[in-house]
Image (cartoon, helix red, strand yellow):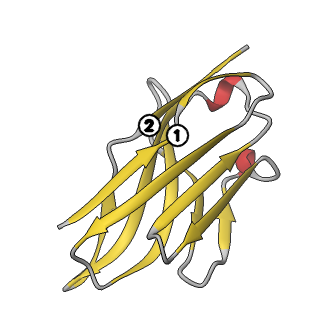
Amino acid sequence: QVQVVESGGGLVQAGGSLRLSCEVSGSYSSIAHMAWYRQAPGKERELVASIAAGGSTNYRGSAKGRFTISRDNAKNTVYLQMNSLKPEDTAAYYCNVFALVRIYNNYWGQGTQVIVSS
């Protein structure tokens, strides 16, 4: 069983910053890639950023230059530093991890809400 728990969401004014955290726990052998997705009301869930086990990163277009994904393998935690937030960043943010439990599977957290006011 793998548990994925996000934290750090909240209400912030446009131009502000938030740091999201996602801690992974449970019985697994290793974690491959970790990622943050978001889903705004009435829209599909979309990738924000991902980070591989070796540290290489990938960002969706609007996150480039404003968001930074990082991971602490010793703490089994992935972070998303979000700067220069815009109202259009308002969404539920979900952590996704690709973890090895006999075979590799995707695991999702419950999400953390980010609201950016104008």
**Closest to the observer, 99 or 11:** 11
Could you tell me residue 107's position as x and y percent? Answer: 30, 61
Query: What residue lies at 60% left-to-right and 85% top-to-bottom?
Result: 54
Report, in whole angstroms, how far the alpha carbon at label 1 lies from the one at label 2.
Answer: 7 Å
Which residue occupies the extreme front position in the image? 75
Q: Which residue corresponds to the image point at 44% horizontal and 70% vertical from the top-left?
A: 76
Quadrant location of the N terminus in the rendered image: bottom left
From this view, report whether residue 99 is shown above or below residue 29. above
Percent across and percent down for residue 34 are 48, 67
Q: Is residue 37 left or right of residue 11?
A: left
Label 2 secondary element: strand
CB under 8 Å between discs 1 and 2 = yes
Q: Residue 98 appears at what percent x and percent y? A: 38, 72
Say which residue label 2 marks.
112
| Residue that mark 1 sits on | 8
**Residue drawn at (45%, 24%) of the image:** 41
